[in-house]
Image (cartoon, coloured by chain):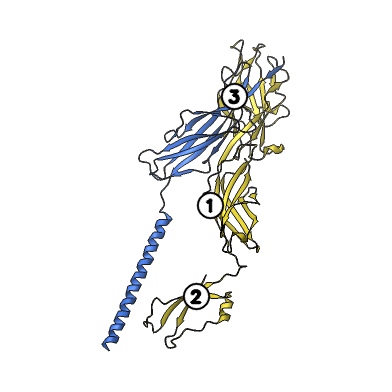
Amino acid sequence: MLIILGISFVSAFSVSSPYMENKELNIFPDSKITDLEFVLQNGGGATENVSVRVTIIEGSEIISITDEENIYLVSPGDKVPVNLRITLPEGVKVGNSYNIKLEFSTVSSGQSGEFGFGTGQEQIFKVVIIKEAASESNFNSIYFFLIIGILLILLIIILLLIKRKNKKQTMK
Amino acid sequence: MLALEFVLNKTTGSFLAIDSGILLSYGISSITFIFNAFSISSFFNSYFFFLTLFKTIPPTGIFISLAYSTNLAAITLTDAPSPTFVVINFSVTDPDGAVNLNNDSAALNLTKAGEELRYNSSCAVKDYSGNYANYTCNVTMWWWDAAGSWTVYANITDLGANLAINGTHTVTVNSLKGFVMSPSALTFSSMNAGTTNQTPTNNILMNNTGNVDIASNGVQINATDLVGETNADKFLWAGNFSASPYTGGNIECNITASATAMANMSYTAVTNTILAAGNYTIGDGTAQEKVYLCLREAGVELTQQQYSTDALGSWTVKIV
């Protein structure tokens, strides 16, 4: 009995991400909403469309998909955005962190007699709540006004000394 | 600009002579100066004058400043096998006029430690006026270029071969994660009910189409039972399949050695699989991984019919 297992390979896809396991997303506590964009591509020499399902595996308490559906049709050579939103809960504190795990997988319709194969991948990153640092411009402004103030005081002292000197000369 | 401070003795009532030799020692060939006496006081028994000297720059001592005209947005690389063309503009200011710039020397590099240099050695003049010129550079990047911060170096020379470099900017390359599999069919040379350790004559080949290294055991397979299409009570059990990056001597069937047994409707990491990023089109194994499947046992109860994933869903190969 000769068996040929006819594999139905669904075209592969790739995901471009601004954040990854070694690049966390830092958010200030007052940034209630942060929008993110991942990009789906159907490359690798693909010639057919691919449908990709996006599933939030971890972190659903703060991240959501803002597109109408979570299945995206990607044509060969296309770049399709996946829009997500981080919404921080009330009472979030500096130092809090959240693990995000997203799963991207192909959606295939099984066909009779086929040994179907799909592809998938995980995107993992961390959201960390950080303290808002004092901006450099504020720092510079403080020093600018401090220097101006010192110069003004020096100018006043010099003028007073000149005035006193002139007064003494007049008295003589 | 060179600023010097002079303190004059009040008893002389005149300026100190400026020795031209001293000026020359500062590299100043000629000077002009603005004299500002903003305060005169005998408080310290001296008069204070502040003189500001402006150096007249000779034509050969050109000064060039570079500034990028646009904010550099994060780069989304194009999936393999296509290149990504990154366009970056920068501007140049030359006190001797834009005509003094050597346009053929305008170049731009993108660098990151451990990565190949990406560059455009012949940026084009976009526009120029007076002392200002704007250049546009098209740098070719590839899908395996690492994610993270890349330093941008723009450089140009003038007609006197004076070089100006600006390396103060960085640009972020986003991560790109993906792979493609082949072939389109797996062929078992012969398979009968009750046989063991049947391996296909070919294997699954995975090519990394992104810039993310998939670490050891980072390839997972979610297997499903193959159900008989005529008699749905007969199965090729998922648990009877195994996978391995190795072959020879049926090692891909040996789950007590390095092979990994599959499990029905559950992701299982294929032990020792690695899929590093790189240029897989070289075809020498770079950015490639092979996965060998094995049907360790075809049940004696099986009948001759088609078995498929139609009922329980496709297998999924995943990278994590």
Task: Say which residue label 3 marks.
Answer: B315
Residue A7 visible, this angle: yes
Chain A palette colour: blue
x, y percent for residue A116: 61, 22
Q: In this rendered view, identify the residue nearer to me: B19 or A6.
A: B19
The quadrant in which residue A154 appears is bottom left
Callout 1 environment at 10 Å: few (<14), some (14 to 19), or many (20+)?
some
x, y percent for residue B154: 60, 54
**Mark number, residue B33:** 2
The quarter of the image holding the C terminus of chain B is top right
Callout 3 environment at 10 Å: few (<14), some (14 to 19), or many (20+)?
many
The three-letter amino acid code for the residue at tag 1 is: Ser
Q: Secondary structure at mark 1?
A: loop
Write down which chain is painted yellow.
B
Image point (41%, 82%), residue name: B47
Chain letter of mark 3 equals: B
